[in-house]
């Protein structure tokens, strides 16, 4: 009996001691099957290697209500220590205090700049980084090879220029009466297309959308108008696509993958998994077409791991949370994320991996990443609306592209000014 | 003089004690309601005076700055205008249709409850499901409404009557049509509620008034105008107030019917409630969004008071 009591006491003491030594870190990301799985695997590895820390992933709900939940939880002093956020939200989240800078004592700036691909610089606000990505994404052209064959196009020679793109799209489009049976291109202003106009087309035509210091909108001119005019001509002049062809969230992708009534879409590398699992046809991926000048451009983006104010509760917690962020962004973690989620790694060394560049699917995205730019947003939601409205004014109200882009540029400039004034 | 028998001294009468207990029971839900409803509502007044930050110590006082901003903001103006349009369309339309259907159902002897159930079904269907189904029905390329319009054209063409046809419509992407299209969905959804309320109201009107009026030679229109309508007044007041508040708070249908461009196209379907949500959670500007809610609260309060004043006349029997 005496032995039993002693054994119990010792066990209890050991349990309490370990519990005190352990720091618990809460991790949040929006609910998406493959991302949750990948993170669970990473957490399992991390917890095994770091007995003094326990990381717990909590279900933060679907994408549509993710920001709402983060706001409510943090305002109540609860929620995550390490949080995943879209890079474009960094500005708005930083102003609202949802995300705090990565502490300089745990994250060396030179290391960040040499280890990650350059687009990570876009989340540097006032000299501090607000998060680091495990994976990045770029845009590419997905196309239905079967339909290319059907209309006599070479499925192994996807359009390289926008002229070829328009010609192919015309050949692929089937109209019946006033409606389309199939469209050559899936127009989606609110999908990736606002990025295509703002970042891809303007850069191809010779101007970046914003000044390097992020204080000035540069697309409010003839070049911006030309970009918008070309994009909207796909619907208004060439009639190879139509806004809201397939209704619902990501209708353009549904139309491409499931209905097979859209022959080509511009989408991010995050769509690869969905296409791979669900497309019942022969498909291919190509780099984005260019204008005749041959200038290439792409829009890169990423979800990143940032720290909330909760992580700053104590130096021990901050150190543990920082260690976890470094762990999920190391090369092995990026490799796992690529295998499980299908998203491209964010480290310079991995992007240059010859096996990846030669991959028929990933290759096009990796090639795009080399010249991709992650637009530096100050308020992604509002800046997106400004461009989507610019597109819709032309498509739905017949507005002049120059007038429409000037209005968008003025709205966008006001957002930059407001953010920079704070 | 007869002396009343002595009663045991009690500080409270039975009725008073019953009332006291009633207050005690009522106090619990009221306290709960005050805590989860009134207190947060009051807090939004406070929030609207500060920039938003999760740490209260890092909020900056802006006074009425956000109210000034929203007065000047064209998107808020558009949302305000749209919201009043929703009310102006959906309240009279759903009430007129609801009353009409209720009158017809009352005349139906057999299967009334089956009809009532059918009309009521949309009301208890989740707004999300309704919005998605209507989104497909309205779609230009796949939607059944446009398919019917095209079939109708083909039919008329045979007789050389194409002029009578209606072109297929971009119900949800045409900026001039989108708000009306969404309103139709809202009316359709709320119809069942109106029907049930009006049916109950109609059944509460004593038959005897109709019989008396008929003996005096009243026409069916007279009966409706001078018996049914005045006696339905309490029901109409209730219905107007509830439907107006619903219209002013419209959110679910709008969010889901154009999921990729919520409140679009070009903000033409944006409601104040959705605008507030977008500012609060899409842009993390909870201070500004709180100012929007305060304005919405004031609008609903004023509109409701005016409606009660205008419609709550004493009914003379």
Image (tube, grey):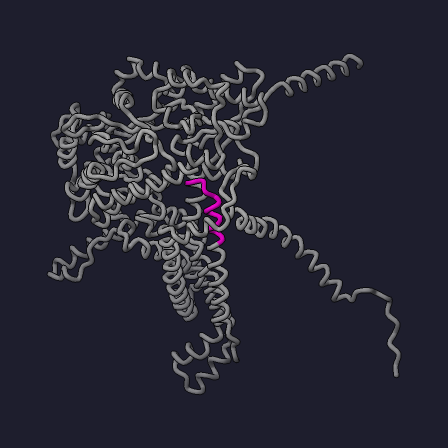
Quadrant where the C terminus of chain A is found in the figure? top left
* Quadrant showing the N terminus of chain A: top right
Residue at image point 83% right, 65% down: B10
Q: Residue at 72% across / 59% down in the picture?
A: B21
Span colored in magenta: B283-294
Q: Which of B213 and A392 is in front in this view?
A: A392
Q: Does the magenta stretch include residue A61?
A: no
Q: Quadrant of residue A233?
A: top left
Q: Position of residue A402 (x, y in %)?
A: 21, 43
Q: In this view, does B81 lie above or below A112?
A: below
Regarding residue B203, the answer to whether it shows in the image is: no
User: Most extreme residue toward the front, as rendered?
Assistant: A421
The image quadrant that residue B260 belongs to is top left
**Is B286 colored magenta in this rendering?**
yes
Give the image quarter of residue B158: bottom left
The secondary structure that most of the magenta stretch takes on is helix
Q: Where is residue A302 in the image (x, y as percent from the top left)?
A: 37, 27
Vertical comparison of B33 with A141: above or below: below
Q: Residue at x 23, y 25 (%)?
A: A287
Relative side of A392 to B114, left or right = left
Front residue of B176/B139: it is: B176
Left or right: A283 as drawn, with respect to B315: left
Find residue A152 and report its horizontal and vertical position in percent. Answer: 11, 30
Q: Which residue is drawn at 58% across and 17% down?
A: A52
């Amino acid at each position: 009996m005496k032995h039993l009591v002693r054994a119990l006491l010792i066990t209890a003491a050991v349990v309490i001691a370990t519990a005190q030594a352990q720091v618990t870190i809460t991790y949040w990301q929006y609910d998406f099957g493959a991302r949750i799985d990948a993170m669970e695997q990473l957490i399992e590895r991390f917890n095994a290697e770091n007995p003094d820390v326990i990381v717990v992933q909590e279900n933060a709900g679907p994408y549509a209500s993710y920001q709402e939940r983060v706001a409510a939880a943090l305002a109540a002093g609860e929620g995550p220590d390490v949080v995943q956020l879209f890079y474009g939200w960094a500005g708005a989240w930083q102003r609202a205090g949802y995300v705090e800078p990565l502490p300089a004592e745990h994250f060396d700036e030179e290391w960040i700049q040499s280890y990650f691909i350059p687009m990570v610089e876009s989340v540097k606000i006032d000299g501090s980084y607000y998060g680091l990505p495990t994976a990045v994404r770029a845009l590419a052209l997905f196309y239905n090879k079967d339909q290319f064959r059907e209309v006599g196009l070479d499925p192994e020679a996807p359009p390289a220029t926008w002229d070829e793109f328009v010609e192919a799209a015309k050949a692929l489009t089937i109209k019946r009466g006033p409606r389309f049976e199939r469209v050559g291109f899936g127009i989606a202003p609110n999908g990736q297309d606002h990025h295509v106009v703002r970042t891809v087309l303007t850069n191809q035509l010779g101007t970046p959308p914003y000044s390097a210091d992020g204080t000035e909108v540069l697309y409010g001119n003839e070049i911006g108008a030309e970009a918008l005019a070309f994009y909207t001509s796909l619907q208004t002049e060439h009639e190879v696509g139509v806004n809201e062809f397939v209704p619902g969230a990501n209708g353009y992708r549904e139309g491409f993958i499931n209905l097979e009534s859209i022959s080509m879409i511009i989408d991010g590398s995050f769509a690869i998994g969905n296409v791979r699992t669900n497309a019942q046809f022969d498909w291919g991926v190509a780099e984005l077409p260019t204008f005749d000048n041959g200038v290439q451009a792409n829009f890169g983006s990423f979800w990143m791991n940032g720290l909330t104010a909760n992580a700053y509760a104590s130096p021990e917690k901050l150190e543990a949370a920082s260690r976890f962020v470094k762990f999920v962004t190391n090369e092995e973690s990026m490799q796992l994320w690529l295998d499980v989620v299908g998203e491209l790694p964010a480290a310079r060394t991995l992007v240059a991996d010859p096996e990846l560049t030669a991959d028929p699917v990933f290759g096009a995205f990796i090639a795009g990443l080399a010249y991709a730019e992650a637009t530096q947003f100050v308020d992604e939601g509002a800046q997106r609306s400004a461009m989507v409205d610019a597109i819709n004014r032309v498509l739905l109200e017949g507005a002049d592209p120059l007038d429409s882009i000037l209005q968008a540029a003025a709205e966008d400039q006001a957002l930059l000014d407001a953010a920079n004034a704070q | 003089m007869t002396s009343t028998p002595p009663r045991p001294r009690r500080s409270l009468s039975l009725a008073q004690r019953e009332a006291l207990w009633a207050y005690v029971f009522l106090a619990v839900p009221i306290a709960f309601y005050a805590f989860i409803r009134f207190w947060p509502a009051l807090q939004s007044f406070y929030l609207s005076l500060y920039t938003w930050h999760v740490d209260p110590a890092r909020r900056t006082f802006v006074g009425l700055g956000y109210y000034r901003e929203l007065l000047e903001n064209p998107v808020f103006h558009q949302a305000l205008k749209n919201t009043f349009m929703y009310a102006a369309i959906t309240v009279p339309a759903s009430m007129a249709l609801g009353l009409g259907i209720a009158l017809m159902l009352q005349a139906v002897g057999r299967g009334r409850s089956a009809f009532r159930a059918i009309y009521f079904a949309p009301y208890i269907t989740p707004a999300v499901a309704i919005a998605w189904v209507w989104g497909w029905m309205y779609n230009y390329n796949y939607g059944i409404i446009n398919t019917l319009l095209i079939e109708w054209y083909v039919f008329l063409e045979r007789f050389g009557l194409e002029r009578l046809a209606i072109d297929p419509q971009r119900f949800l992407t045409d900026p001039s049509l989108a708000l009306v299209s969404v309103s139709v969905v809202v009316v359709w959804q709320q119809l069942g509620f109106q029907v049930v309320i009006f049916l109950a109201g109609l059944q509460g009107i004593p038959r005897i008034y109709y019989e008396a009026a008929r003996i005096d030679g009243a026409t069916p229109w007279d009966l409706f105008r001078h018996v049914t309508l005045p006696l339905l007044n309490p029901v109409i007041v209730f219905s107007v107030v509830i439907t107006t508040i619903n219209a002013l708070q419209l959110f679910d249908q709008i969010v889901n019917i154009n999921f990729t461009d919520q409140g679009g196209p070009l903000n033409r379907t944006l409601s104040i409630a959705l605008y507030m949500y977008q500012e609060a959670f899409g842009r993390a500007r909870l201070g500004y969004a709180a100012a929007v809610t305060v304005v919405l609260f004031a609008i609903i309060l004023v509109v409701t008071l005016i409606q009660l004043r205008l419609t709550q006349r004493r009914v003379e029997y």
